[in-house]
Image (cartoon, rainbow, N blue to C red):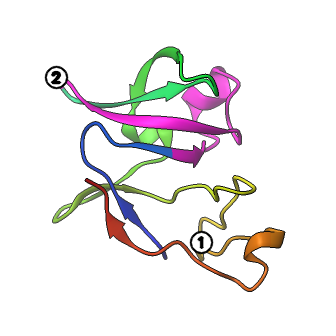
Amino acid sequence: MTQLFVRPGKRVRLELPHSEVCMHMQVAGKVMTVEYLDRQYPVAQLYYEDGKEFSAPITMGEAGFYWDQVNGYYCYPACDYCGKIDQMTGIHHCPVHAAGATIKPEVAA
């Protein structure tokens, strides 16, 4: 799988999971910008398309981030063109990425 490791302050575009919180906020399955905030405990702030904050921050897991003991939080970013990515394979399924291009793993600064 293709992973993008994130650090506090990093914003990424994610297709939000169908977690309980995302379902309640009616954003499950939508692509939004999400920022990793390092507060009293790590949280994720969602943003509208215009850059304004959406609701209060939610937990990293509810926003679609995963934890790696060595490298910290990571996610599977959405395609910049269509917003979709196969969460299991990391392969984009859109006209721009029809050849099966994947996101290159990197550590986000």
**Residue beneath the point at 60% across and 77% down:** 89
Position of residue 91 measured from the top left corner of the image (x, y, whole percent): 64, 75
Label 1 amino acid?
Met
The reply to whether discs 2 and 1 touch (Cβ–Cβ < 8 Å) is no
| Residue 40, numbered label | 2
Residue 22 shown in magenta: yes
Q: Is residue 55 above or below residue 93?
A: above
**Residue beneath the point at 56% across and 47% down:** 14
| Residue 28, numbered label | none
Residue 35 shown in magenta: yes
Which picture quadrant has residue 4?
A: bottom left
| Residue 88, numbered label | 1
Label 2 amino acid?
Gln
Query: Dot 2: within a 10 Å radius of its alpha carbon, few (fewer than 14), some, or many (20 or more) residues?
Result: few
Q: Is residue 4 above or below residue 95?
A: above
**Residue beneath the point at 54% across and 23% down:** 51
Q: Is residue 85 left or right of residue 21?
A: right
**In whole angstroms, how far apart are the C-alphas of marks 2 and 1?**
31 Å
Q: As drawn, which residue projects farthest toward the right?
A: 95
Q: Nearer the viewer, residue 106 or 42?
A: 106
Mark 2 or mark 1: whose residue is earlier in sequence: 2
Q: Look at the numbered disc 2 and give the secondary structure of its residue.
A: loop
Query: Dot 1: within a 10 Å radius of its alpha carbon, few (fewer than 14), some, or many (20 or more) residues?
Result: few
Q: Is residue 59 left or right of residue 27?
A: left
**Residue beneath the point at 83% across and 71% down:** 95
Position of residue 75 measured from the top left corner of the image (x, y, whole percent): 44, 56
Which picture quadrant has residue 27?
A: top right
Q: Which residues are magenta?
A: 13-40
Position of residue 22 measured from the top left corner of the image (x, y, whole percent): 60, 30
